[in-house]
Amino acid sequence: MRIVVAHNRYREAQPSGENTIVDAEIAQLTAAGVEVLPFIRSSDEIPAMPKTAKALLPISPIYAPRAQEELSRLITEHRPDVLHLHNPYPLLSPWVVRTAHKHGVPVVQTVHNYRQVCSSGLYFRDGMICQDCRGRALGVPAIVHRCYRGSRAQSALMATTLAVHRGTWRSVDRFVALTSAVADHLRDYGVPAERIVVKPNGIPDPGTPAPLGDGFLYMARLSPEKGLALLLDAWRRHPDGALGPLRIAGDGELRPLAEAAAAERADVSYLGPLDRAGVRAAIEASAVIIAASTWHDVLPTVIIEALAAGRPVLGTALGGIPYLLGADAPREPAGTGPAAVATAAPGEGRVALPHGVQAGEAGWVVAPEPAAMAAGLPVARAGAAALAPAARARYDRTFHPDVVTRQLIDVYAGVAPTPAPR
């Protein structure tokens, strides 16, 4: 099987789990015997572009002529079975779907965000979940609120791109939804259920988990939607040292918030941005990983890294987080109904949990509110050791490369043209 993997890499200065996943997926497919033809562009190329190319950048999200010419040559020369698209913006454009179809090549797309509808891709604005553009032919609210790169002009361009390419997206042969929540988003967009496959990302097996460390690790891009402020509000509701250490890793606009928390309390430390070795060391030093997102986070890679290392996760009940932790059954809203009752861990019996806290197979989910997160922290600290084996077992069963790569190859086989009999 011969597959073109198309992806516009995000800038290296902007840490991207999507870049990491695409690289890992190419390596996993190659190891499984699939011939991969990378069709990769990077936003880091933009500053070095000649003036003529830069002049065309404003229209590239709608139609990137150079990318279409190069893709046509690649398809003509190598005759791939499938084009697998990840991020098309800004240097590829969704037009690559039309180019592939023109050559008779079916298209699979992994949906990493909500950019079929939302110009920012996040469903998040001004510190709150926002779906104002959902169901609109043109995302006027995105233009009004400068949702794309803080620019009204660029937001108008992206909103126009999404309107122009509505038919393009609906022509994709198969969508890979990373979680059940993304599948719901695609069905709401009008994609028939039979063209959606739920297949999460996977990461390489790091080996036998190290013994649990102590305390909590929050590792994310330090931007508002990742919930650092929510976590720190919840953390301050407990006495200094009561929960063990909290380590914060990452970089971004909220770095001063992390640094101030570390200066304020002895049980908080700020590690800064980490390389791969640093990430692994930080995970191993901790007992629980926190995913405090306040947006519908699609599939935070840090959760899969935690499960692979045998660390349970305390996360908010938004986006794909409940799915990742095996906790995506229907939930009562925080503060309503009787106290939640859930299984703490396989074989551990049933225990009453505080309002707004639900136990899953590999961790706990809480309402995205400081009080619920504060209630979840001691629950996670007390239950980490019991849930650690289940966390690794969920990784082995659901996110191991052998599992997800086989699923992806099956997706390709389901759309690839049947060879003519000889």
Image (cartoon, rainbow, N blue to C red):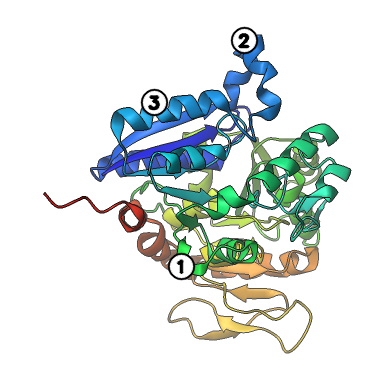
Image quadrant occupied by the N terminus: top left
Looking at the rendered structure, the secondary structure element under dot 1 is helix
Which residue is tagged 2?
50
Check if mark 2's residue and mark 1's residue have beta carbons within 8 Å: no
Residue 322 lies in quadrant: bottom right
Looking at the rendered structure, the secondary structure element under dot 2 is loop
Residue flagged by tag 3: what amino acid is it?
A: Arg
Please report the residue visible at 37 percent of the width from the left and 46 percent of the height from the top: 204
Left or right? Give the position of 5 relative to 319.
Answer: left
Please report the residue visible at 64 percent of the width from the left and 61 percent of the height from the top: 189
Does residue 61 appear in this view? yes
Q: Residues within 10 Å of mark 3 (few under 14, many from 20)?
A: few
Please report the residue visible at 44 percent of the width from the left and 40 percent of the height from the top: 102
Which residue is tagged 1?
194
Measured as percent of width and height from the top left, residue 178 is found at 51, 57
Measured as percent of width and height from the top left, residue 416 is found at 32, 51
Give 73 or 368, whichever is nearer the viewer: 73
Residue flagged by tag 2: what amino acid is it?
A: Pro
Give 365 or 119, whichever is nearer the viewer: 119
